[in-house]
Structures are given as structure tokens and as C-alpha cells.
């Protein structure tokens, strides 16, 4: 039955591979269940709504993942988008002073617009308008970006006077934080080596085993006193204190919409959510699809309408349940790297999101230093596609370079795409190489430039 539904053989995969891929994807993105409530609870009125937000995040993520499987049969997982949840809490509800109900209404309206855009091929047209070389650059850029995230999650790279700097063991020994933070950095680096070794040896499930082994070493370190948790510093116990617990739903966030905002402000809020989500999603889909060899010879993704529709439905349902924008997660590439190729990966991820409502204490105990090695190794695998960029054609190569570097340094997939598109159009106009370039590329370049002055 599963073969008929998901076409394992046709996609070059099998049930075991898809199961491992789904579990791996979930474990690399389960952090969102802890992080999303933390961010959204900063909004006035939501200080005690952590349990309700966790519930909304898990259920909306599951619905979106199931939609991905049903509409597109692709191995992409979805959950509450980072950055967009911060915009929700700190800008809309904080600086602009709107209630969280108004913010949820803006997300709901964005979702409805997304559904219309997906059904009318607008988002698909944008996807297809991006040149093939730039699509490769997006995939490579995401590799750079996800490596950077992994290094930060592992605290190998930290804030410094140079914006980012390497973690200092000497300083940690001097100030007494070595056995709290320093040990996790060492464990993460060991995890990278272990995961890389398993990859080189061709071990099936290497990403999942890397996470579990690194987590296991962390547990041993805590039991022997080498790792000392310090919640005030953000370092928690890696040993589950319990396995089963239901979230506190005392704050009702379901169907709590409010259309009372100023119409002009409301349009700006919706547009900001819309703009970032469109290009974050497109960038993630491009990168993950390229990694899975799903793009055809023209750089198009067969069945992309279903992918984008799942994203739109997830956002709409998420707003009704009580969470910010749902988007396709770049961590999907971890499951794809494990061999996941069908929507069954999304189904497994969705089921685990629902299971997390009961087993939240277990899943939320998975430390960032255990999943960071998986992200770093995935980054390496995605950056291998850099060889598919024609570096001898400077008019193509320079925009690709801009896209790759800005995606990591601006810490945003959508910003990387924006700079890539703007530079691509300007360079091709100046060099007279505009033949075959889509009119939509000119439109996108203008919109991106306007965005930086108007938003």
C-alpha cells in the first residue's frame, strides 16, 4: 500500500530509508518546539502561553507535513519559520503595538494570499524565472548558511568584536564555563568527526547515528560531571527528566483572529510576512530539490505547485491554531542526505510532531550540540554542488558568488536570493547579455530594491 501511495521504487528509495530520513529530519528541527514558544511568548499577552504555542506549532507542522505528502509526495518538512516569528513578536506586537490576535490575523491573510498565489501559478512562475545557475547558487548558499547555523548552535562560532569569532577554550577555563559550554563545543566537534566517518564508510542512517552518538556522549559527560548544566546560561540537562507530559493549554489561541488594525499598517504587516516567506520557501525548496536531484534539465521542479500549496495551507492552519508563519525547513536536507525521496519522509516527520505533544520532555531534551554536527555535514554535502556553477562565465559566476555569500553573512535565505537576483539583472544589463532572461527577473529585481527602502 505504501509503495502504491509514495512510489518508493520509482523514486529510488525504500521503506527503511524513508523511515530513517523522516526521523533524522525531525530530530534536526525539533528545536523549533522549544524555540518558537520562547520567541512568541515575548509578545504582550502571551507571556504564559508557552504550552498553547507548542501545541499550535506541533499540530500546524504536522498538518503542513501531511499536506506536503498528499499534494506533492516530496520529502520536505515544515514548521514555524525563524525570523518571521521574531517579526511577529518583536515588531508587530512589540514596536508597532498590535495585539497578538491582530498579528495572527495578518498571518492568516498571508496564508490565504499564498493559497491563491500557489493555485494561480504565481509562485511557480517566480521559481521558474530564476536562472538555472542562480538556482545552483541558492543550493550552495543554503549549504553555507546551514553550516553557519550548525557552528553557532554548537557554539564553535560565537559573537565577538569582529561580529563572529572562534570559541575560546582558554577564556572558558579562566572564567569557569569550560565544563558547561566548553564541553559541548568539544562534543559537537567530535560529533562532526563521527558523522563524517560514518558518511565516508557508507553507513545507512549515518546522520541519525551521529546525533544519537553525540547525545549519548553528552549524557555520559553529565553523569561523570564533565558537563555541568547551567539553565541561566542556556545549557540544560541532556538527560530526560520524564518522558510523558501534556502541554498547558490554559491560554486559548485557537481561532483568535482580530481585523481591527489600521488598514495601511495591516497591509504592510501582511506584505512583510508574505515577502520573506515567499523567498525563504522558494530558496529552501530550490536547495533541497537540487540536493535530491529533483530538478529537471531546465532547473524546474515537477510538482512544485503541490509543494507551495502545502506551505500555504500550513501557514493558514497555523494562524488559526495560534502560531506564526509555517514554512519549509532547510533542515529537510538532513533527511534528503539520508536518502529520503518521497512524501513518506514528511508523513513520519508529521507523526513525530504529533507524538511530541505527549513525549515533549524527551524530544526537547535533544541538545543543540548533538544536532549541530548533522547540519554541518549537510552543509558540506550541499556545497558540493558549487562545481555545477560555470565560474568561467563571470556574468553568471559573480551573481552566484553574491547570492552564496550574502545568504550566510546576512543570515537569511531570502536576502541571499534578493542580492543574487539584483546583481544578476544589473550585470546582465550592463554586459548586454539579456537574451533569454525572463521579464519576471526584472520585476523581482525592482521589487527587491524597493523592499530595502520601503520596509
Image (cartoon, rainbow, N blue to C red):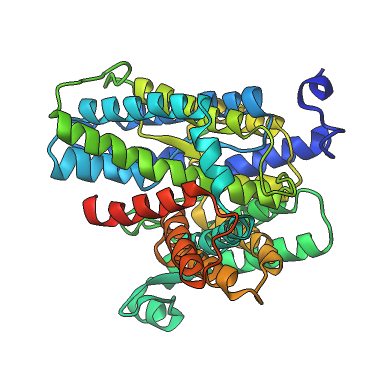
Q: How far across and down, in percent of the image, does residue 146 sit? A: 54, 58
Query: What residue is rendered at 28% in x and 44% in y?
Result: 87
Q: Is residue 286 left or right of residue 439?
A: right
Rendered position, 63 above or below 238: above
Rendered position, 101 above or below 185: above
Q: How far across and down, in percent of the image, does residue 67 sit? A: 58, 24
Query: What residue is rendered at 60% in x and 51% in y?
Result: 287
State the quadrant of the N terminus.
top right
Q: How far across and down, in percent of the image, does residue 154 sit? A: 50, 63
Q: Is residue 207 left or right of residue 433?
A: right
Rendered position, 287 above or below 227: above
- Look at the image and tell me whether residue 131 can be seen: yes
- The foreground one among 120 and 317 is 120
Q: Quadrant of residue 80?
A: top left
Q: How many marks?
A: 0
- The foreground one among 308 and 38 is 308
- Look at the image and tell me whether residue 183 can be seen: no
Query: What residue is rendered at 60% in x and 62% in y?
Result: 140
Residue at the right extreme of this rendering: 9
Query: What residue is rendered at 51% in x and 72% in y?
Result: 431
- The foreground one among 24 and 194 is 24
Q: How far across and down, in percent of the image, does residue 429 sit? A: 47, 65
Amino acid at each position: 500500500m505504501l509503495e502504491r501511495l509514495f512510489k518508493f521504487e520509482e523514486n529510488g528509495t525504500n521503506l527503511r530509508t524513508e523511515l530513517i530520513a523522516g526521523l533524522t529530519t525531525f530530530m534536526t528541527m525539533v528545536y523549533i518546539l522549544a524555540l518558537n514558544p520562547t520567541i512568541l511568548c515575548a509578545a504582550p499577552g502571551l507571556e504564559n502561553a508557552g504550552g498553547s504555542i507548542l501545541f499550535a506549532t506541533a499540530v500546524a507542522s504536522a498538518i503542513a507535513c501531511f499536506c506536503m505528502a498528499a499534494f506533492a509526495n516530496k520529502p520536505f518538512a515544515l514548521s514555524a519559520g525563524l525570523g518571521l516569528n521574531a517579526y511577529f513578536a518583536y515588531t508587530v506586537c512589540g514596536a508597532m503595538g498590535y495585539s497578538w490576535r491582530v498579528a495572527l490575523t495578518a498571518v492568516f491573510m498571508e496564508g490565504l494570499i499564498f493559497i491563491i498565489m500557489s493555485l494561480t501559478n504565481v509562485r511557480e512562475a517566480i521559481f521558474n524565472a530564476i536562472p538555472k545557475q542562480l538556482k545552483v547558487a541558492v543550493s550552495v548558499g543554503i549549504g553555507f548558511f546551514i553550516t553557519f547555523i550548525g557552528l553557532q548552535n554548537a557554539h564553535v562560532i560565537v559573537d565577538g568584536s569582529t561580529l563572529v569569532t572562534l570559541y575560546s577554550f582558554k577564556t572558558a577555563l579562566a572564567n569557569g564555563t569550560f565544563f558547561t559550554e566548553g564541553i559541548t563545543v568539544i562534543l559537537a566537534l567530535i560529533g562532526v568527526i563521527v558523522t563524517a566517518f560514518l558518511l565516508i564508510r557508507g553507513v545507512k542512517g549515518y546522520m541519525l547515528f551521529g546525533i544519537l552518538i553525540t547525545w549519548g556522549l553528552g549524557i555520559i559527560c553529565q553523569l561523570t560531571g564533565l558537563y555541568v548544566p547551567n539553565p541561566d546560561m542556556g545549557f540544560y540537562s541532556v538527560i530526560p527528566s520524564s518522558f510523558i507530559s501534556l502541554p498547558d493549554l490554559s491560554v486559548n489561541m485557537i481561532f483568535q483572529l482580530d481585523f481591527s488594525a489600521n488598514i495601511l499598517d495591516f497591509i504592510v504587516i501582511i506584505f512583510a510576512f508574505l515577502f520573506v516567506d515567499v523567498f525563504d520557501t522558494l530558496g529552501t525548496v530550490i536547495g533541497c530539490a537540487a540536493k535530491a536531484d529533483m530538478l529537471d534539465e531546465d532547473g524546474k521542479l515537477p510538482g512544485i505547485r503541490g509543494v507551495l500549496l502545502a506551505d500555504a495551507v500550513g501557514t493558514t492552519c497555523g494562524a488559526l491554531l495560534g502560531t506564526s508563519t509555517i514554512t519549509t525547513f532547510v533542515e529537510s536536507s538532513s533527511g534528503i542526505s539520508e536518502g529520503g525521496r518521497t512524501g513518506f519522509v514528511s508523513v513520519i516527520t508529521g507523526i513525530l510532531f504529533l507524538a511530541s505533544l505527549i513525549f515533549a520532555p524527551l524530544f526537547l531534551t535533544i541538545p543543540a550540540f548533538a544536532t549541530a554536527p548533522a547540519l554541518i555535514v549537510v552543509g558540506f554535502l550541499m556545497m558540493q554542488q558549487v562545481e555545477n556553477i560555470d565560474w568561467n562565465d563571470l556574468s553568471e559566476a559573480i551573481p552566484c558568488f553574491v547570492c552564496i555569500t550574502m545568504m550566510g553573512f546576512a543570515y537569511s535565505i531570502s536576502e541571499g536570493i534578493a542580492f543574487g537576483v539584483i546583481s544578476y539583472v544589473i550585470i546582465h544589463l550592463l554586459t548586454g547579455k539579456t537574451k533569454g532572461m525572463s521579464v519576471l527577473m526584472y520585476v523581482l529585481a525592482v521589487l527587491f530594491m524597493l523592499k530595502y527602502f520601503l520596509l
